[in-house]
Amino acid sequence: MKWLSILLFAIGCTSLQAQTMCPMCRKPIVPSRSVYAVFTVGSQDYRLTFRCIACALHAAERWHPNRALLRTRCVATNRWVTLKWADGRWLAEPESARLLLAPEVGGECLNRHLVFSNPSAARRFLARHPALKTFPLLPATQLPKVDHMAGAGKE
């Protein structure tokens, strides 16, 4: 019986782990939806993890890095999508990647700031989520300044 109480104690303690918070919005980072970033400022590299793509883009605007690399998974296909900032513009890999940056509702960003590996994956996803169809799908080369989006990175 002693081993059972130890097992139950160990299982109970796993829920006490500290969650990692987004450095921009201070909301918990969901590992399956996180955005990994490397910002180069001068000769220094900074590695950060963000809750959503809008927080990562907003941080890139604030830091004004010489170079930035953002990496996350497509919400529809689970394929990796990489955004690169160089020479004053964003580029995407794959080039067909699209972003949907809808304003937050109720302080929630994960179902509003989305990355897709290609337009057809985005259309299939949006067919199942009609409330998001009114927002444009943007290629990386047409990304707006994030701080002009209502609710981006804010509670």
Image (cartoon, grey):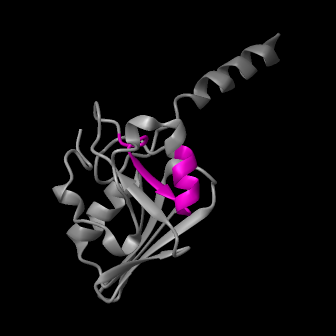
Identify the image quadrant of the C terminus. top left
Give the residue at the far left of this rendering.
148
In the drawing, does residue 52 fall left or right of residue 120?
Answer: left
Instruction: Give residue 26's position: percent from left, percent from top.
Output: 31, 44
| Observer able to see residue 73 | no
In depth, the one of 106 and 67 nearer the eye is 106
Choose top left, top right, bottom left or bottom right for residue 80.
Answer: bottom right
**Membership of 11 in magenta stretch:** no
Q: Residue at x 56, y 73 (%)?
A: 94
In the drawing, does residue 81 fall left or right of residue 86?
Answer: right
Identify the image quadrant of the N terminus. top right
Q: Which residues are magenta?
A: 109-125
Choose top left, top right, bottom left or bottom right for residue 70.
Answer: bottom left
153 in relation to 107, above or below: below
**Membership of 117 in magenta stretch:** yes
Instruction: Give residue 33's position: percent from left, percent from top.
Output: 51, 49
148 in relation to 43, above or below: above
In depth, the one of 100 and 32 nearer the eye is 100
Instruction: Give residue 128's position: percent from left, percent from top.
Output: 54, 37
Q: Residue at x 52, y 29 (%)?
A: 16
In depth, the one of 65 and 140 nearer the eye is 140
